[in-house]
Image (tube, rainbow, N blue to C red):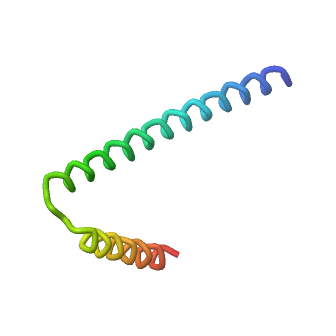
Amino acid sequence: MEDERKELFEYQQAQLEREIENLSWKLEREELYKRGDFENQMDSTNISTQEIRKIIQKRFQELMETQKRVN
């Protein structure tokens, strides 16, 4: 009985680890894709560094406000 529980636990743990690895891989690919997409957008439009900073600051503020609402 104890061996069966141990095997089940190890199986579930392996499944969880595999799922975490898959999600990590997907997240990494998503970040690379978005970064490449962002860089392509910057190349295709002449956005100044100052404009980029404004956009980043605005996005950061939006994220902070969203986080405050969630917490």
Q: Residue at x 65, y 28 (%)?
A: 14
Place of residue 8 in the rendered image (x, y in percent of width and height, measured from the top left): 71, 26
Q: Residue at x 73, y 30 (%)?
A: 9
Considering depth in this image, is 70 or 29 the residue closer to the camera? 29
Compared across the picture, whether 14 is left or right of 1 comes to left
Q: Residue at x 32, y 72 (%)?
A: 53
Q: Residue at x 56, y 38 (%)?
A: 20
Compared across the picture, whether 26 is left or right of 50 comes to right
Place of residue 6 in the rendered image (x, y in percent of width and height, measured from the top left): 79, 26
Seen in the picture, residue 14 relative to 69 is either above or below; the reply is: above
In the current view of this chain or complex, which residue is farthest to the left?
Answer: 45
Place of residue 58 in the rendered image (x, y in percent of width and height, measured from the top left): 32, 76
Q: Quadrant of the N terminus?
A: top right
Seen in the picture, residue 15 relative to 45 is either above or below; the reply is: above
Q: Quadrant of residue 45?
A: bottom left
Figure disc tally: 0
Place of residue 5 in the rendered image (x, y in percent of width and height, measured from the top left): 78, 27
Considering depth in this image, is 9 or 42 the residue closer to the camera? 42
Seen in the picture, residue 48 relative to 37 is either above or below; the reply is: below
